[in-house]
Amino acid sequence: MQFSTPKPRPKAESIVPMINVVFLLLIFFLMTAQIAPPEPFEVTPPTAAAEDPADTGDILYVSAEGEFGFRDLKGDDAIAALSERENANSPLLIRADASVDASVVAGLMPRLAGVGITDATLLTAATGE
């Protein structure tokens, strides 16, 4: 009994190059994306003449109604969480709404000192002068 030799199967397309391209695109998008935590609420900072831009760091948000926000916490929880912030050596950046009463920002200073923060910077928007 004589058997015929089987026909060779057609070579399947390799998907390895496509996988390589997908991983390269993934790495590209991860490296170029700016990952920042979302702001807890909309804040319009007051304006001032532009000097040096503020460094990035921990930001305490103050809404127009005087509510405090830090990362995903609001109110007194946000102030309490400031004592455990990662960048303890850098100044705390305060981003207050332009319409917030100055007494709210001034009253914030003793509360910040109570959780151990001695260096704070108020962020403003440049007027373009």
Image: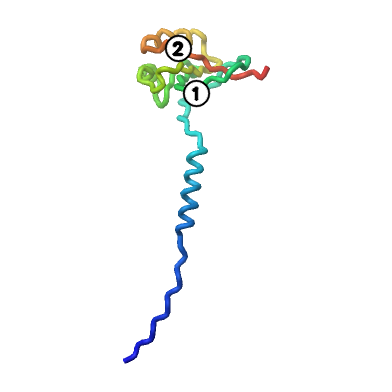
Q: Residue at x 46, y 21 (%)?
A: 59
| Residue 67, image x, y percentages | 45, 18
N-term mark: 1 or 2: 1
Q: Residue at x 45, y 68 (%)?
A: 12
Give the amino acid type for the residue marked by disc 2 in the picture: Asp
Q: CA distance from mark 1 to mark 2?
A: 14 Å
Residue identified by numbered label 2:
119
| Residue 106, image x, y percentages | 47, 8
Mark 1 is surrounded, within 10 Å at the Cα level, by few (under 14), some (14 to 19) or many (20 or more) other residues, namely few
In this rendered view, identify the residue nearer to me: 93 or 80.
Answer: 93
How has the structure been colored for display? Answer: rainbow
Q: Place residue 37 in its image quadrant.
A: top left
Mark 2 is surrounded, within 10 Å at the Cα level, by few (under 14), some (14 to 19) or many (20 or more) other residues, namely some
Give the amino acid type for the residue marked by disc 1 in the picture: Thr
Relative vertical location of residue 15 with respect to residue 36 in this rendering, above or below: below
| Residue 58, image x, y percentages | 44, 22
In this rendered view, identify the residue nearer to me: 27 or 81.
Answer: 27
Q: Place residue 92 in its image quadrant.
A: top left
In this rendered view, identify the residue nearer to me: 84 or 39.
Answer: 84
Residue identified by numbered label 1:
56
Q: Residue at x 31, y 92 (%)?
A: 1
> SS of the residue at dot 1?
loop
Q: Residue at x 39, y 9 (%)?
A: 113
> SS of the residue at dot 2?
loop
Marker disc for residue 47: none
User: Looking at the image, can residue 9 be seen?
Assistant: yes
| Residue 123, image x, y percentages | 53, 17
Q: Residue furthest right?
A: 129
Question: Is residue 57 found left or right of 129 in the rendered image?
Answer: left
